[in-house]
Image (tube, rainbow, N blue to C red):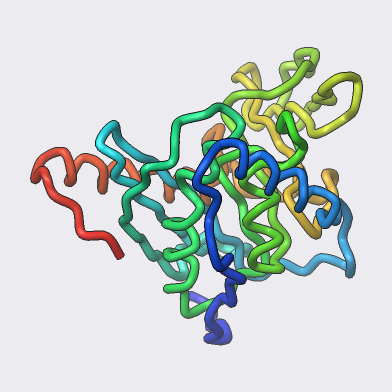
Amino acid sequence: MSRRFTVRNVKVANPDRWPRTSEEAAAEQDRLRSAVIAENPRPPRFRTIAGLDSAYDDDGNVVAAVVVLDAETLETVETVTARGTTDFPYVPGLLAFRELPTTLTALEKLSVTPDLLICDSQGLAHPRRFGLACHVGLLTGIPTFGVAKNVWGDYEQPDPRRGSSSVVTIDGDPVGCALRTRTEVKPVFVSVGHLIDLETACAQVLTLTPEFRQPETTRRADRLCRDMLHEIAATGTTSPD
């Protein structure tokens, strides 16, 4: 039987205005970077953990999904989705600005506030040390980190055994780790977003990967996003939320 959790909506500090150009977006990342806290402000206790994912197509349609799991059983507690559009340019390092508005719309639909957010994106492992996971963490005030399939930066291959890791660096600075979640399978890349340290983040990833390379949180959210994009492609329409 699923455990019962306190109903409490996520409070999102939506900006009054989103950057419209790549120059404005880069300046916003530089401005906010110093506010990131890469440590646990209190002993972590995660009862509910949410996975966030988003995707978009060539027509500017954006979809986002949030899947909340019971941290103990990995049962799905709540699922929400959102659809939107974007005209922000495709610029590596600034892709968050194509996805964030729709992602925040999805988060605001939750009736259960997760204790931890895991983004299918980068955190500090980013050219300006401020990936989407950092941005989400600052806007929600919830501990957040990123788990990415690909890496920004340099690293050495960790030992092939599950649980092995190696440091990811950018310009010689440590920004995350390559973590092996399955023996002899390509690692995932973990980096802090906000209000959590890297050791705690990696421990949570291992707890959430009992069968697959990706954490169950973002793996389930990714499936929802793929289904929504397929529906948009099949019908040719979208209904922004």
Q: Can residue 206 be seen in this view?
A: no
Up the image or down, 111 lies above or below 88; here it is below
Q: Which residue is drawn at 38% across and 65% down?
A: 80
Q: Is residue 3 visible?
A: yes
Q: Residue 60 location, x and y as percent?
A: 30, 40
Viewport quadrant of the C terminus = bottom left
Q: Left or right: 241 with respect to 14?
A: left
Q: Which of 31 and 141 is in front in this view?
A: 31
Up the image or down, 56 lies above or below 216; here it is above
Q: Residue 144 location, x and y as percent?
A: 69, 55
Q: Left or right: 196 with respect to 237?
A: right
Q: Residue 18 location, x and y as percent?
A: 53, 56
Q: Which of 166 and 129 is in front in this view?
A: 129
Q: Which residue is drawn at 36% across and 61% down?
A: 81
Q: Left or right: 25 with respect to 157?
A: left
Up the image or down, 128 lies above or below 183; here it is below
Q: Which residue is drawn at 51% across and 52% down?
A: 100
Q: Nearer the viewer, residue 23 or 120?
A: 23
Q: Left or right: 93 with respect to 69?
A: right
How many numbered marks have been drawn onto this rendered protein structure? 0
Q: Residue 47 location, x and y as percent?
A: 66, 70
Q: Which residue is the extreme one toward the left?
A: 235
Q: Which residue is drawn at 60% across and 19% down?
A: 185
